[in-house]
Amino acid sequence: MSEIDAQLSSEVAEQPAAGPVQNELESRRAFLTRTSLLSLAIPGVGAALAACSPTGGASHDSAEQRVGSTTDTGAQGGQPHNSDSRLDSAVLKREHRAATSATGSATQGAAAVAYHRFAPELPPLSGGATQQIHFHAREAPVRIDASTVVAAWTFEGDVPGPIVHTRVGDTVEFTLTNDVDIPHSMDFHAAQIDPKEAFKSVLKNESHTFTFKPRHAGAFLYHCGTAPVLMHLGSGMFGAIIVSPREPMPPAKDFVLVQNEFYFGDAVNGAHPSSFQKMLGMLPDLVCFNGRPNQYVNEPIRVKVGDRVRFWVVSAGPSHPCNFHIVGEQFDTVYLGAPPGNAIRGVQTFSVAPGGGMVYELVCDVPGEFPFVNHGFGHGQRGAIGLLVVEH
Ligand SMILES: [Cu+2]
């Protein structure tokens, strides 16, 4: 047993006692999490760790076992497995895709990909009490400015994925179909649901459906939860699900901003893959609102004098917060959670944690051009800045 293996085994052994079943579950989860990360960081270490697992390398999860055995023989037709599984990183390792997102279909045709501004307007509610949503997990080159194409892992071919808008108490029936070799999954932060089943990984050409009713209003993140989450989220698999309250909020112009970081490896076929090692270092190349650096400086968000403006701000991370501020303005209201409740007044800057969302309102009674920024200015300088133009 190597030094790393021994250290991990001793850490697992030191898990606090919480009843034998709970303790075993937690030990296994902690172990698998570490295994996934280390499998990517240190080629070959995953297999060694599996042999030293607290369950002796055997799985208690029959579905996981079945998939594991089909994957070992190279077959792809097994049951969808859990994001809690060794398989996810094992597949990555096997395909030599551990270090970057530069898969074939993520870089193909990069030079010809057109740029488009990501529309920040909150889409209207669908009207019905049940909303059916079907996303495909896809790899795609995504142009984020004139000179930069990202080899992205995506929902529906764009970064971020589509904005979902629903309402407290409505039903969301969601289906994920995976078009690519690497397993992917969906984790809706607006759902309260058993993640082991609902958020499980989906294999190529398979689909998985789950249903939930959001209980709280707010701006919520969704993201791929397949291990290692850092790699999947950091490569573009995220977006916003906006949950409106049942009770009316003040009439406003509603916009959605999802902040994310990009960590680039060397370009392949003209597309920049995401670098897992740089993600671990947490020093991003770019920080963006809605997936493109400075896009709302070049093509601002425009409103009229007298408009109330509401920003639903989500921080996708994967690792940094969004310290949201508007130069020359103040938020008359920030809803910390479950709007229209939990309002604080007269706010200059408020931080959205990675994996979080908040709602910001201001009344635009002064005409002008107002930069909205991540006031952690290292992030603003790297692209997390836009313009709100208030016109007569
Ligand atoms: Cu994924």
Image (cartoon, rainbow, N blue to C red):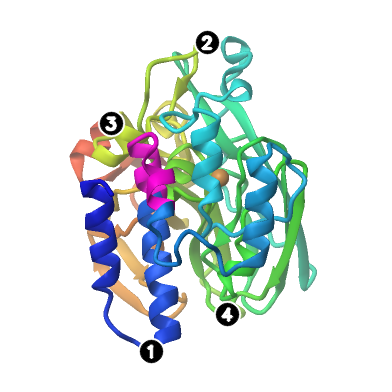
Outermost residue, front direction? 1
| Residue 278 vertical placement versus 270 (above, below) | below
Quarter of the view holding residue 81: bottom right
Ligand 1 resides in the quarter of the picture at top right
Which numbered disc flags the more N-terminal residue, 1 or 3?
1
Residue underneath mark 1: 19
Residue at screen point 62% across, 31% down: 139
Residue at screen point 62% across, 16% down: 108
Q: What is the crowding at mark 2: few (fewer than 14 residues within 10 Å), some, or many (at least 20)?
A: some
**Picture coordinates of residue 175, whole percent (x, y):** 74, 56
Instruction: Tell me how far mark 4 sits from mark 2, CA to CA.
Output: 45 Å
Residue underneath mark 4: 215
| Residue 32 vertical placement versus 338 (above, below) | above
- The magenta segment is 36-50
**Picture coordinates of residue 146, whole percent (x, y):** 47, 15
**Picture coordinates of residue 315, whole percent (x, y):** 39, 53
Instruction: Tell me how far mark 2 sits from mark 1, CA to CA.
Output: 53 Å
